[in-house]
Image: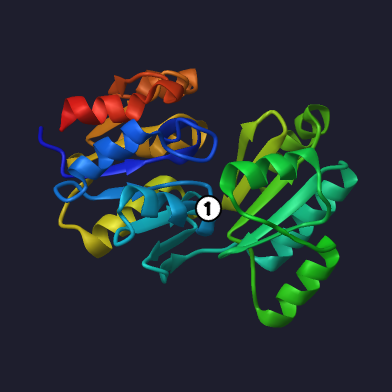
């Protein structure tokens, strides 16, 4: 089948480096971008994706941020689904009780309470800088401005994350997507959103294509729905075993330009 649109996750998938694509990957995607729209799909905030759109020459395409909670096209909001404030407050209380740090995200705003090693890594990987403020103050300010969160991030030691993850799942699993992206990090979004929901919205709004016409690349649990639903779901070799089992194709490791190599073969 001739695929007509490409969706790709970033971290652990498209990015051969911690915060950039390789020259080979950039070259392969630029080669096909005028024939095959390329849409980035990530848990990242917008400004941590825009520089990659620019690097690939795809600024005119929509991008799916925060695992589908926010969809933008050339800085215009297409879809925005946030976590309700009472839920944010309850998650915050739970994080305090379990000695886990919190990050709150809304559009291009990112708030944390203090600089930690985990925050430093996130700054380096995403090229975004947080604002430092007590979570109580952020919540108070957001309430007065009618804001909410596109994403909540829980950051802590592996032991503390081990402890809080089942608590969060039990308490909030019916209303939130709670996803452990690594040993020290949990990412949370509204239950209504996923990368697949974002892809469906983008297809409905901008392209005359079906899911069957799409190829998608991913590596982690939050990629499973989209990899299973599209016409060609591709896992990189470093992907979770569960993802590789449902993928149509397994390409090379992200550090070996797995996405670009398969793009070269496919297109």
Q: Position of residue 154 (x, y in %)?
A: 73, 45
Residue designated by label 1: 48
Q: Quadrant of residue 233?
A: top left
Q: Residues within 10 Å of mark 1 (few under 14, many from 20)?
A: many
Q: Quadrant of residue 58?
A: bottom left
Is residue 35 rendered to the left or right of residue 260?
A: left
Q: Which residue: 41% across, 47% down? A: 41
Residue 174 seen by the camera: no
Is residue 127 rendered to the left or right of residue 33?
A: right
Task: Reply above or below: 47 against 3.
Answer: below
Q: Position of residue 115 (x, y in %)?
A: 81, 49
Q: Position of residue 189 (x, y in %)?
A: 58, 52
Looking at the rendering, in which quadrant would you find the C terminus? top left
Q: Nearer the viewer, residue 171 or 163?
A: 163
- Which element carries disc 1, helix, strand or loop? helix
Q: Nearer the viewer, residue 2 or 32?
A: 32
Extreme front residue here? 23
Task: Reply above or below: 174 against 75.
Answer: above
Q: Which residue: 59% across, 50% down? A: 127
Q: Nearer the viewer, residue 262 or 183?
A: 262
Q: Which residue: 53% across, 40% down? A: 19
Looking at the rendering, in which quadrant would you find the N terminus? top left
Q: Nearer the viewer, residue 242 or 131?
A: 131
């Amino acid at each position: 089948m001739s695929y007509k649109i490409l969706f790709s996750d970033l971290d652990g998938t498209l990015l051969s480096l911690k915060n950039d694509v390789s020259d080979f990957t950039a070259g392969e995607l630029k080669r096909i971008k005028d024939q095959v729209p390329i849409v980035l799909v990530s848990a990242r905030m917008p400004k941590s994706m825009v520089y990659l759109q620019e690097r690939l020459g795809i600024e005119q395409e929509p991008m799916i941020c925060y695992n589908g909670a926010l969809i933008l096209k050339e800085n215009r909001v297409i879809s925005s689904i946030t976590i309700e404030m009472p839920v944010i407050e309850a998650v915050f209380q739970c994080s305090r009780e379990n000695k886990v740090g919190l990050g709150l995200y809304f559009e291009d705003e990112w708030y944390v309470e203090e600089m930690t090693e985990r925050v430093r890594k996130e700054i380096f990987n995403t090229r975004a800088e947080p604002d430092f403020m007590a979570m109580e103050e952020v919540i108070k300010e957001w309430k007065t401005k009618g804001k909410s969160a596109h994403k909540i991030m829980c950051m802590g030691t592996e032991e503390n994350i081990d402890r809080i993850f089942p608590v969060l799942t039990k308490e909030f699993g019916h209303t939130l997507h709670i996803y452990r992206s690594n040993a020290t990090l949990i990412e949370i979004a509204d239950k209504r959103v996923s990368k697949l929901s974002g892809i469906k919205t983008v297809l409905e709004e901008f392209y005359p294509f079906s899911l069957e016409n799409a190829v998608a690349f991913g590596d982690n649990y939050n990629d499973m729905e989209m990899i299973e639903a599209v016409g060609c779901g591709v896992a990189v070799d470093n992907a979770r075993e569960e993802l590789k089992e449902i993928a149509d194709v397994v390409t090379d490791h992200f550090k070996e330009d797995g996405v670009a190599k398969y793009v070269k073969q496919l297109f």
